[in-house]
Image (tube, rainbow, N blue to C red):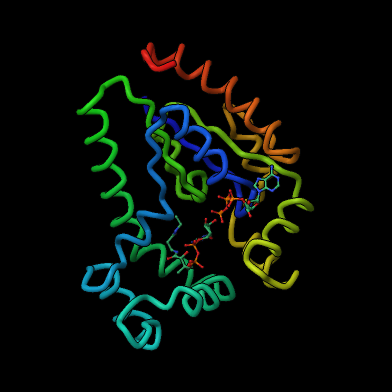
Amino acid sequence: MLLGLTGSIATGKSTVAEMLKRRGAVVVDADQVARKVVEPGSLGLNRIKETFGSEMLTADGQLDRAKLGELVFADEEARLRLNALLHPLIMDEMKRMTAESLDKNPKSIVIWDVPLLIEENLTQFVEQVIVVYVPQAIQLKRLMERNHLTKTEAIKRMQSQLSIEEKKKVADYIIDNSGSLEETERQVDQLWRYLTLKSGSDQP
Ligand SMILES: CC(C)(COP(=O)(O)OP(=O)(O)OC[C@H]1O[C@@H](n2cnc3c(N)ncnc32)[C@H](O)[C@@H]1O)[C@@H](O)C(=O)NCCC(=O)NCCS
Ligand SMILES: Nc1ncnc2c1ncn2[C@@H]1O[C@H](COP(=O)(O)OP(=O)(O)OP(=O)(O)O)[C@@H](O)[C@H]1O
């Protein structure tokens, strides 16, 4: 079974994905795959160098993530160009990882943790969409704290994605992460019970 887990930036996708992983889910994390496809020597990194110039690389040949982030979250056209370069590579790798897990265990509960699941129309590949929700005021606060951003910088990042209120409307299942982590754990327990029943999985 393949499900999508999404939310908007800093609403708590990774937090919930980790909770699901502890219960036995196989999580395929798009942000991690996005790092893998730009490792030194990769096709992804070469594409970035050709398009945005070698100033996007650090002295030791790694992607300068802070610099590229500054550019793409301030310039929508650059962000769309970056997406066009990397998304096909990310998708291929995510599909490969998913097929590998399901081959090994057809009853696996595979979760795609993808921030842009809805924006990029990837909902077509998953059975159901789980949205991790917090109101925008909490999202802004957590994003500023986690990434040490000013309010203006954080708002720019939030605006590069569909708003969490819009994503909530598309959800088959909503996890409200605005309370304590314990409250979120309880909701994840309930979700996990539902998923294991649905998948016929023998996992607890
Ligand atoms: C721009 C980059 C270099 C910034 O790196 P950085 O380490 O600062 O951030 P990180 O990758 O951890 O992403 C943090 C969050 O930013 C948001 N985000 C990342 N890329 C994008 C994007 N292209 N559009 C909108 N939001 C994005 C997501 O919510 C993500 O969870 C990096 O995010 C990147 O390579 N993005 C392009 C690939 C992509 O679209 N990734 C998203 C998953 S498909
Ligand atoms: N219930 C909670 N209470 C307090 N802080 C939380 C809670 N859930 C998550 N956080 C914090 O909020 C921040 C965002 O959470 P997380 O990194 O899981 O979000 P994300 O949606 O995966 O973000 P991104 O889109 O950037 O990948 C983190 O610093 C995390 O520790």
Left or right, 76 with respect to 63, comes to right
Residue at 55% of width from left, 33% of height from top? 130
Where's the C terminus, which quadrant? top left
- The spot of residue 44 in percent (x, y) is 28, 67
Residue at 65% of width from left, 35% of height from top? 169
Question: Above or below — where is 102 with respect to 141?
Answer: above
Where's the N terminus, which quadrant? top left
Q: Quadrant of residue 24?
A: top left
Residue at 20% of width from left, 28% of height from top? 103
Q: Quadrant of residue 156?
A: bottom right
Q: Quadrant of residue 165?
A: top right
Q: How many marks?
A: 0
- The spot of residue 188 in percent (x, y) is 58, 27
Query: Farthest residue toward the right?
Result: 137
- The spot of residue 8 in percent (x, y) is 61, 50
- The spot of residue 149 in percent (x, y) is 68, 71
Question: Above or below — where is 126 with respect to 6?
Answer: above
Question: Above or below — where is 38 with respect to 136?
Answer: below
Left or right, 79 with respect to 173, comes to left
In-front residue for pair 178/73:
178
Residue at 52% of width from left, 78% of height from top? 71
Question: Above or below — where is 48 with respect to 94?
Answer: below
